[in-house]
Amino acid sequence: MFWSRISGVYDLVENVYNGKTNRAVTDYVATLMEREDKVLECACGTGMFSVKIAPRAAELTATDFSDGMLKRTRKKCSKFSNVTVEHGDITALKYEDNVFDKAVAANVIHLLDDPKKAIDELRRVVKPGGTIIIPTYIHFNASVAANLFNRAGAGFKRHFDENTYKDFFEGLGITDVQYHISEGRMACDTAVFVNK
Ligand SMILES: C[S@@+](CC[C@H](N)C(=O)[O-])C[C@H]1O[C@@H](n2cnc3c(N)ncnc32)[C@H](O)[C@@H]1O
């Protein structure tokens, strides 16, 4: 699959081409964690967010549907005793209802045929009153790296900007959302909302 094929170069592109944004957004997401949190991360990729979340939370379950990506996350997170890395499809999570305090799904919503299904799954597994955190690159249709990824087969389904990202959540009936933009070559907009 595409993501396993490019897992070896993903960090190079993310750290070199878009390092400023990625440092800012991963640091921001880390600040949202609390010591007692049991956190689910979906579409963890190579573990770029996982390594920032793990030291700030009680437990992290990092998941992705690409074995190549999971191999990288497993390696990076081997120094943390509170991280479990496992296979998982964000649109069909294998967890019980109401088990996590927080869920993070970064840079995946724009890839999905049915993003509502993913959001419904996150809302199902996060406890009422828990927090759902969804950082997504915006304006990436203008980005060289994103165009290269897309030509190589990433299959982006939609391109967001600040306004269409808000419209997306409003269209799902989720209105009480905080947005935080991390600037850089390919900016990232983090949507944060409390699960009702
Ligand atoms: C652009 S990468 C983002 C990785 C990481 N979250 C980050 O921001 O660096 C997209 C990731 O989504 C994963 N992915 C795509 N569709 C998925 C699905 N349905 N379930 C789980 N992971 C998925 C891919 O395997 C890939 O690792």
Image (tube, grey):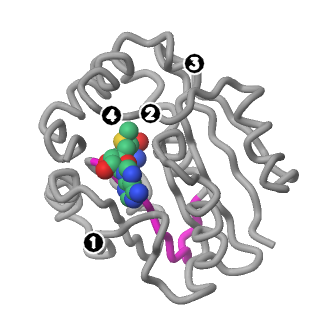
Quote the CA–CA distance across marks 1 and 3. 31 Å
Amino acid beneath label 2: Phe
Q: Where is residue 125 in the image (x, y as percent from the top left)?
A: 58, 78
Beta carbon of the mark 4 residue lies under 8 A of ligand 1: yes
* Range of residues picked out in magenta: 33-45
Instruction: Please tell me whether mark 3 or mark 2 is closer to you in this view.
Output: 2
Kindly identify which numbered label has been placed on residue 156.
Answer: 2
Residue matched to label 3: 139
Q: Position of residue 114 (x, y in %)?
A: 56, 54
The secondary structure type at the circle numbered 3 is loop
Q: Position of residue 13 (x, y in %)?
A: 26, 24
Kindly identify which numbered label has been placed on residue 86.
Answer: 1
User: Mark 3–mark 2 contact, CB under 8 Å?
Assistant: no
User: Mark 2–mark 4 contact, CB under 8 Å?
Assistant: yes
The secondary structure type at the circle numbered 2 is loop
Above or below 55: residue 164: above
Residue matched to label 4: 154
The answer to which of marks 1 and 3 sits earlier in the sequence is: 1
Amino acid beneath label 1: Glu
Quote the CA–CA distance across marks 4 and 3. 16 Å
Amino acid beneath label 4: Ala
